[in-house]
Image (cartoon, rainbow, N blue to C red):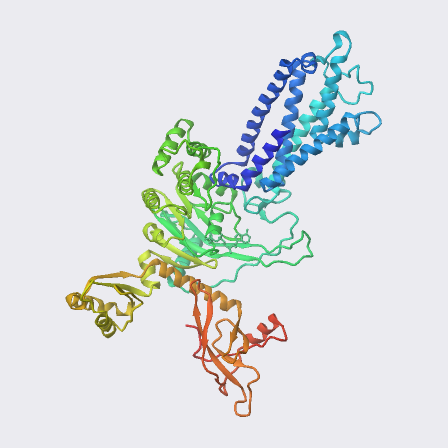
C-alpha cells in the first residue's frame, strides 16, 4: 500500500513540474510514456511480491509454507499490479503532489477499514447479490482481504488437504461452506480490473486538462484521425465541466511599422502562392492564440471571463543558420508563441510551418518533434537523476542509436561545461548549472530547430558568455529561436530581432536596423581629465553646433543623445572636438548608436500607450483647486463641469500634460491654468460611454474636448 502512495506521488510530480510536458515536446510518445511506467512498475511489483513470499517462508508462516508458492506469489503480484493501475487512474485527476499524498493516504486508510468489513464476511456470502459483490470488488484492498482470508483458512484444512494447491485454485475450499468466490476468481478480478484501471487512466489522461490546460474531446478515441495521426489536432482547452465561451478572433490591426508590414506581406504572398522558401526554417502564418473566457463555478450560469488574445496574428519568416531573437516585456506573448510552435498549446487561428510541417496537423507535429529541441523557461529536471542520465534519457527519447547515446551525452555535457558535475544529482546543481543542463538537453540529437526560452536566466556573467559562445557556434546548420530579457544577449546573438508587445510584433530587423530606426540617435560620452577641464565650454560647443543639451552629467563626464537628423554634421563636429580636446580638458570621447534597450523601451512604451488609449482607461485629475475629475487616459483638453457662466457659456477647461513612467504607463505630469473653452469646441463622443462604464453619480467626469491639433504624437 505504501508503494501505491509513492506511485501516485511520482506520477503527479512528473506532471506538476512539467517533466511530462518537456518529454512530450522532445518527442516522447504517450504510448512510450505509459509503457515505460508499466514496465517499471511491473518489475518492481514482481520483485517486491517475490521478497514478501520469500520472507514469509523464511519466517516459517503456515500461510506461506502450506499454500503453494505460486498461489501466494500470484496474489501479491496481481494485487500490487492492480494498485498500480488504480494509482495511474487516480493520478489523472490530481495535479499537485501535496494532493496526491493526501489521496494516497486516504486510499490507504479507507482500504484498511473496508478490509476489516470484508473480514467480517461482507459481501462475500450468499446473503448479498452479485452486483453488490462486484461493486465491492472494484476496490482492490477488498479483494486482497477476501483472498487473505481464504489462504489463511486453507492451511487448517485436514491432512493432505492442508493449504491451497495451484491445481485446485478454481475449487471451493472445505473451510468455505458458502463459497461465492474462489482464489482463481480473485485472480481474474484483479487482472480484469487492472486492465480497466489502466485503460481508464489513459482515457482520463487525455480527457483531463494537462499542465498547459489542454485536453482531448470526450470522444477522441472514436475519431479515426486520433489513431492514424491524420487530420488536424483535436485538442481543446479548459476543463470538461467548464463552459467555454465562443472564441472571437482578435481585430486585425495593420502593423504601423513598414518592416513588419513588409514581412507580413511577404509571408502572405508565399502562403498564397504555396511557396516554401528553402532558406526558411519556421514560417508563422498569422498565428493567433486566444485563451478562451470561461464560466466559473462549474456551471453555465456563472459570469463569463472575457477571452484573452495572447498572440494577435504573427506573420514571420525565421531563417536557417540564424539566431532569431524574440523580445518583449512580460506578457507580450513570447512563451505562448513558443508553446504553439512546440505543440504544447493549441493555436486558435493561423498556422506555422516548421521545415514545411504544419503545427496544425498531428502528423506534422509528430514530425516536428523529431527535429526540434526545446529549452523551456523553467528547468524541467528530475532531482534524483544526474546530468549525464538526463542527457542519456533525452538522447534515447530523440531516437539516437543506443550505441551512440553515451558518447553523445558525454559530448553534450562537455559543450556546456558540465563534465565534472555530469555524475552529480541534478537536484544538487545550482540554478546556472541547471540552465546549462537544460540547454544541453535542447541541443541533444542535433535538432534542426532549437527553441531557447530565456536560456541564460540566473547565470553568472562568465557562464553566460560561455553559453553565448555555445549558441553562436550551434547556429550553423540549424535555426535558433531565442527569447530573452537581456538586450545585450539579443544584440550579440540575434541575427534578426523581433520585439513583441501586447501580442503583436511591433518591429523586426537586424539590431543595427532597429537601433537606427527606433533609437533616439547617437550617444556621445565625453569624459574629462582630472584637471584643466571645462565642462561649460563643452556644453556650449555641443549646443552651438548640434543644438543638444546633456542627457546625463557628472563631475567627470557628460553624455548626449544626438538625434539622427544631425548625422550629417557629426564628422566635422567630432574632428573639431578632437582638435580642441586639450583646450576643453577632455580625456576621452566615445560615440555609439543608441542601445537596443532604448529601442525596446520605446517600442514597449508606445504599445502600452496605444493599449491604454484604445481601452479608454480612466484616471483621476486633481486640479489646483483640489477638485478631482475623472478623465480618459491621454485626454488633452478637459472641461470642468459647473464652471459655465454668462461670460464663458461653455465653462473652463485645462490642458493636461502627460508623461510615461519606466514601464510605459501614462501618468499625469501636470495641467495648465484654467482657460475658457473656445466657442467652437465640441465634446468628444467617448465621454458618454466612459460615464456609463463608471456610472457612480458622485463622480465628476471631465468633458473631453478634441481639436484638430491635439492628436497624440
Ligand atoms: N493559460 C492561460 N490562460 C489565460 N491567459 C494566459 C495563459 N497563459 C498565458 N496567458 C496570458 O497570455 C499573455 C502572454 O503570456 P506569455 O507567457 O506568452 O508572455 P511572455 O511574453 O512569455 O512573458 P514572460 O516574459 O513573462 O515570460 C499573458 O498576459 C498571460 O497572462
Depth order, front residue of 336/121: 121
Image-based side of 131 in relation to 600, left or right: right
Image quarter of residue 565: bottom left
- Which image quadrant: the C terminus? bottom left
Which residue ends up furthest to the front in the rendered image? 531
Image-based side of 193 in relation to 24, left or right: right
Depth order, front residue of 220/435: 435
Image quarter of residue 423: top left
Depth order, front residue of 618/540: 540
Image-based side of 179 in relation to 625, left or right: right
The residue positioned 40% from the left and 49% from the top of the image is: 482
Is any atom of residue 200 visible in this view?
A: no
The x and y percentages for residue 164 are 72, 14
Q: Is residue 344 above or below residue 686?
A: above
The x and y percentages for residue 171 are 76, 16
Q: Is residue 475 above or below residue 530?
A: above
The x and y percentages for residue 473 are 31, 42
Amino acid at each position: 500500500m505504501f508503494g501505491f502512495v509513492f506511485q501516485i506521488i511520482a506520477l503527479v510530480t512528473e506532471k506538476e513540474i512539467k517533466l511530462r510536458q518537456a518529454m512530450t515536446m522532445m518527442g516522447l510518445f504517450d504510448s512510450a510514456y505509459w509503457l515505460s511506467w508499466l514496465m517499471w512498475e511491473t518489475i518492481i511489483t514482481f520483485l517486491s511480491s517475490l521478497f514478501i513470499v520469500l520472507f514469509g517462508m523464511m519466517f516459517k508462516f503456515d500461510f506461506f509454507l502450506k499454500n503453494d508458492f505460486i498461489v501466494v506469489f500470484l496474489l501479491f503480484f496481481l494485487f500490487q499490479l492492480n494498485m498500480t493501475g488504480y494509482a495511474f487512474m487516480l493520478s489523472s485527476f490530481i495535479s499537485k503532489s501535496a494532493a496526491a499524498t493526501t489521496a494516497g493516504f486516504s486510499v490507504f486508510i479507507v482500504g484498511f477499514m473496508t478490509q476489516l468489513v470484508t473480514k467480517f464476511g461482507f459481501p462475500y456470502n450468499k446473503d448479498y447479490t452479485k452486483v453488490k459483490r462486484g461493486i465491492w470488488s472494484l476496490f482492490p484492498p477488498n479483494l486482497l482481504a477476501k483472498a487473505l482470508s481464504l489462504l489463511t483458512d486453507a492451511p487448517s484444512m485436514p491432512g493432505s488437504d492442508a493449504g491451497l494447491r495451484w491445481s485446485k485454485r478454481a475449487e471451493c475450499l472445505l473451510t468455505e461452506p458458502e463459497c461465492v468466490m474462489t482464489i482463481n476468481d480473485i485472480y481474474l478480478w484483479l487482472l480484469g480490473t487492472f486492465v480497466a484501471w489502466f485503460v481508464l487512466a489513459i482515457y482520463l489522461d487525455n480527457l483531463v486538462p494537462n499542465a498547459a490546460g489542454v485536453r482531448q474531446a470526450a470522444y477522441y478515441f472514436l475519431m479515426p484521425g486520433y489513431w492514424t495521426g491524420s487530420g488536424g489536432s483535436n485538442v481543446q482547452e479548459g476543463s470538461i465541466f467548464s463552459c467555454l465561451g465562443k472564441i472571437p478572433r482578435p481585430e486585425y490591426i495593420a502593423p504601423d511599422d513598414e518592416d513588419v508590414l513588409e514581412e507580413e506581406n511577404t509571408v502572405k504572398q508565399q502562403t498564397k502562392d504555396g511557396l516554401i522558401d528553402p532558406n526558411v526554417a519556421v514560417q508563422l502564418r498569422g498565428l493567433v492564440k486566444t485563451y478562451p473566457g470561461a464560466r466559473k463555478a462549474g456551471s453555465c450560469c456563472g459570469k463569463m471571463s472575457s477571452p484573452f488574445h495572447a498572440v494577435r496574428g504573427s506573420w514571420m519568416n525565421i531563417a536557417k543558420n540564424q539566431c532569431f531573437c524574440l523580445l518583449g516585456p512580460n506578457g507580450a506573448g513570447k512563451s505562448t508563441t513558443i508553446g504553439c510552435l512546440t505543440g504544447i498549446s493549441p493555436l486558435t487561428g493561423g498556422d506555422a510551418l516548421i521545415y514545411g510541417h504544419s503545427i496544425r496537423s498531428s502528423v506534422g507535429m509528430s514530425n516536428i518533434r523529431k527535429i526540434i529541441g526545446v529549452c523551456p523557461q523553467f528547468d524541467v529536471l528530475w532531482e534524483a537523476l544526474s546530468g549525464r542520465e538526463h542527457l542519456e534519457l533525452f538522447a534515447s527519447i530523440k531516437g539516437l542509436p543506443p550505441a551512440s547515446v553515451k558518447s553523445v551525452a558525454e559530448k553534450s555535457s562537455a559543450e556546456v561545461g558540465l563534465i565534472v558535475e555530469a555524475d552529480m544529482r541534478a537536484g544538487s546543481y545550482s540554478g546556472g548549472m541547471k540552465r546549462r543542463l537544460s540547454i544541453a538537453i535542447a541541443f541533444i540529437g542535433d535538432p534542426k530547430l532549437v527553441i531557447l526560452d530565456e536560456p541564460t536566466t540566473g547565470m553568472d556573467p562568465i557562464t553566460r558568455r560561455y553559453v553565448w559562445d555555445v549558441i553562436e557556434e550551434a547556429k550553423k546548420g540549424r535555426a535558433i529561436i531565442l527569447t530573452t530579457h537581456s538586450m545585450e544577449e539579443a544584440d550579440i546573438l540575434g541575427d534578426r530581432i523581433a520585439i513583441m508587445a501586447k501580442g503583436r510584433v511591433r518591429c523586426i530587423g537586424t539590431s543595427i536596423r532597429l537601433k537606427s530606426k527606433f533609437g533616439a540617435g547617437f550617444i556621445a560620452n565625453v569624459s574629462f581629465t582630472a584637471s584643466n577641464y571645462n565642462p561649460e565650454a563643452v556644453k556650449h560647443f555641443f549646443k552651438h553646433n548640434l543644438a543638444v543639451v546633456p542627457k546625463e552629467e557628472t563631475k567627470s563626464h557628460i553624455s548626449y543623445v544626438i538625434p539622427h537628423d544631425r548625422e550629417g554634421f557629426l564628422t566635422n563636429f567630432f574632428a573639431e572636438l578632437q582638435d580642441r580636446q586639450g583646450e576643453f580638458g577632455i580625456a576621452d570621447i566615445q560615440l555609439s548608436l543608441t542601445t537596443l534597450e532604448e529601442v525596446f523601451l520605446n517600442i514597449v512604451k508606445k504599445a502600452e500607450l496605444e493599449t491604454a488609449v484604445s481601452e479608454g482607461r480612466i484616471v483621476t485629475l486633481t486640479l489646483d483647486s483640489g477638485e478631482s475629475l475623472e478623465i480618459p487616459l491621454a485626454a488633452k483638453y478637459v472641461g470642468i463641469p459647473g464652471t459655465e457662466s454668462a461670460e464663458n457659456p461653455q465653462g473652463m477647461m485645462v490642458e493636461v500634460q502627460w508623461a510615461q513612467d519606466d514601464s510605459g504607463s501614462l501618468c499625469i505630469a501636470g495641467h495648465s491654468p484654467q482657460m475658457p473653452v473656445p466657442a467652437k469646441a465640441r465634446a468628444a463622443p467617448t465621454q458618454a460611454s466612459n460615464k456609463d462604464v463608471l456610472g457612480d453619480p458622485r463622480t465628476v467626469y471631465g468633458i473631453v474636448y478634441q481639436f484638430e491639433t491635439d492628436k497624440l504624437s
